[in-house]
Image (cartoon, grey):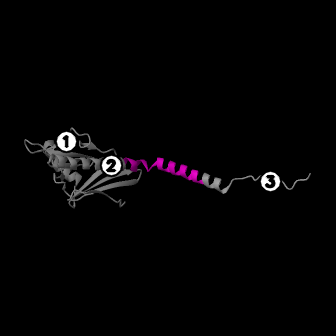
Amino acid sequence: MLRGPTPCRQSGFTLLEVLLVAMLMGLVAMAVTLSMGSVKGDRELENQSARLRAALQQAQEQAIMEGRLVGLRAEDQAWQFMVRSGKDRKWQAIEGDKLLARHELPEGMSLTLEVEGFSWQAERDEQAEQKRDEKERTPQVLLFPGSELTPFTLTLTLDQDGERFLRRYQGDEFGRITLQQEEE
């Protein structure tokens, strides 16, 4: 008995199998890219930027809830929030709140403040402030109980390995604080 030609078994992959493998490779590559994140310096700046943003929001809420002025004092390497004491009406640093207490920036990072179009000259203005007693120092930005604030621009800068990373926050008189697009 003779039989007709026997069907040969095909070897190889179908189009569906090839597309499935390509899709899986793409997903793995995307996961690796996302897990690596951005450059270490940019990540550190993003962490400090998020902390500053959270502190500003917390200070605004505290000013509204307590019905009193809260101030922000920015220095070249640190920031701190202040309130006026009830007795002598002098500005005092907030100590008890971890988010609003004085915060020192990591090495290589700096903070620049511009208030209502006037740049805060850290060296010159700080020298004048150094002459004042620590308890007599005043904030540069005021957050009012009605949610208004002193218009400002705060720039966090990190210079690392020849690269410069920036995060710039701008606050307007209506209490809105926004992250500005990077220009550098």
Q: Amino acid at mark 3?
A: Cys
Residue for badge 2 = 50
Q: Nearer the viewer, residue 184 or 57?
A: 57
Distance from the alpha carbon under mark 3 to that under mark 2: 64 Å
Tell me where residue 149 appears, x and y as whole percent: 19, 55
The range drawn in magenta is 22-45
Residue for badge 1 = 94
For marks 3 and 1, the one nearer the N-term is 3
Q: Amino acid at mark 2?
A: Ala
Secondary structure, magenta segment, majority class: helix
For marks 3 and 2, the one nearer the N-term is 3
Within the magenta stretch, is there residue 47?
A: no
Residue at 64 percent of width and 53 percent of height: 17
Q: Is residue 7 left or right of residue 74?
A: right
Tell me where residue 30 appears, x and y as whole percent: 51, 51
Tell me where residue 97 appears, x and y as whole percent: 23, 40
Q: Is residue 144 left or right of residue 103?
A: left
Residue at 28 percent of width and 48 percent of height: 54
Looking at the image, is mark 3 or mark 2 nearer the viewer?
3
Quarter assignment of residue 105: top left
- Determine which of the numbered discs, if any, sits on residue 56 in the image: none
Q: Amino acid at mark 1?
A: Ile
Dot 3 crowding, Cα within 10 Å, few <14, some 14–19, many 20+: few
Tag 3 and tag 2, C-beta contact below 8 Å = no
Helix, strand or loop for disc 1: loop
Residue for badge 3 = 8
Dot 1 crowding, Cα within 10 Å, few <14, some 14–19, many 20+: some
